[in-house]
Image (cartoon, rainbow, N blue to C red):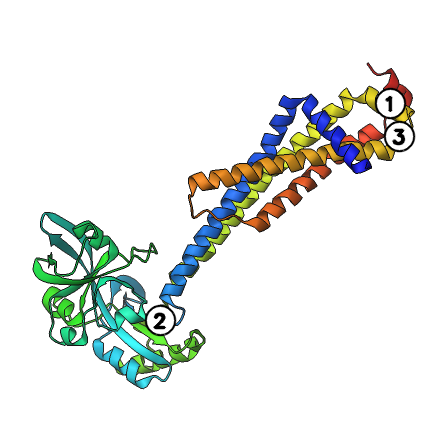
Amino acid sequence: MVVLENIRIAFQSLLANPLRSLLTLIGIAVGIGAVLHVVSLGELTQRRINEQLETMGSNVLLIRPGYSRMRGVRTAENVTTLTWDDARQLEHESAVLLAAVPTYSGQGSAEHRDRNWQTRVTGTTAAYFDINAEVLAAGRAFSEREVAQRSRVAVLGDTVWQELADRGNPVGLEILVNSQRFEVIGALEAKGEGWHNPDDQIFVPLTTAQERLYGVDQLSSILARMRDGGDFDEALFDIETILRRSHRLREDQDNDFSVRRQDFFLSAIQDTNREIANFVVVIALVSLLVGGLGIANVMLVSVTERTREIGIRRSLGANRFHVLVQFLTEAVMLGIVGGLFGVVGGSVFNRIQIGADAVTAWVWVGYSFAICAGIGAIAGVYPAVQGANKDVIEALRYE
């Protein structure tokens, strides 16, 4: 009953000075709303990154050519060391690599009727779509027979599909790729943004890209799928052993190729996103600290204004502890009500700003109320002690 009475008195005190209380509550609410918005954005980004990591797979390695060197200094130019034979050797000789898919990528232009689009053209084999977890939205992927025959067939990434055909039925469309006529046999579902847009490319048979479009025999990369994500060290040993032997590298020569996980870049984005989110949360918590100073200021003013009330309560039998608890309760209620406004306002803002994908971080909602109550209690300690220690006679004389 005493607690409920203190809460009732606290609300009466807040309502007695509505504008002052409202301004204090806004300071707390803005801080809590900012925290919840940042956490919601972080959770949403984390979820999208995890989805992309799942589609890439942690058991896929990306093997790329190394860089040339001039007088011991690495230049920006790739060396042309990877070949289709390298991919075949990796697949046949390694016990932990289930597949090794060759790719060659180059810049290209795609045209359909009055539309044209600058994009990336990727030549590969039929196994690419399985190893890279590509999902067909329409049509089919090209076959090994079409690879062997250097067929002019193409599978469109989602972005190219949109730009050339507004995502209409792509199967059977005739397009020009680098001024050569191709038949579209399929289109892929969107995968989303990474370090580059994986949807902004056209896939053609590797032999077609190498011999008809670019006139090369080297590869841009090899995608190697391991039995399991835990086989990385053994797979790396096999890759280095096989490729160094194939490229006839001496013991004192560095690798002329590089190996990394397919999910490397997204993992880096994940770590960076986490650090940025933590930094912004710290900034939001600083705003809560400022709100706490506002509570302390309001409570000091309240103690001064209610000096005579304190004297009357003390003369009627209230001791210092009762006065201390009363003012602490008011401070805590300021923090909690401000936190409630912040949670409601932050949730509404998230729905408006982010939309249906907004994530409600219920753990942080609980944290918010605990933080607000704690800030209110800490900010109210000094004013409450000041009120509890007032001399009764002096308080009764106060005008």
Q: Where is residue 189 in the image (x, y as percent from the top left)?
A: 28, 59
What is the quadrant of the N terminus in the image?
top right
Q: Where is residue 168 in the image (x, y as percent from the top left)?
A: 19, 53
Identified at 57% across, 49% down, the residue is 362
Q: Nearer the viewer, residue 123 or 139?
A: 139
Q: Which mark is residue 124?
A: none
Quadrant location of residue 82? bottom left
Q: What residue type is labelled 1?
A: Gly
Q: Which of 250 and 209 is in front in this view?
A: 209
Q: What residue type is labelled 2?
A: Leu
Quadrant location of residue 184? bottom left
Q: Is mark 1 on a helix, strand or loop?
A: helix
Q: How crowded is mark 1: few (under 14 residues within 10 Å), some or many (20 or more)?
A: many
Q: Which amino acid does label 3 sit on?
A: Ala
Look at mark 3 in the image and give the residue it sits on. Answer: 318
Look at mark 1 in the image and give the residue it sits on. Answer: 311
Quadrant location of residue 70? bottom left
Q: How far apart are marks 2 and 1 (CA)?
A: 77 Å
Whether residue 65 appears in this view of the structure is no
The correct choice, above or below, for 390 with respect to 162 in the image is above
Q: Nearer the viewer, residue 235 or 383?
A: 383
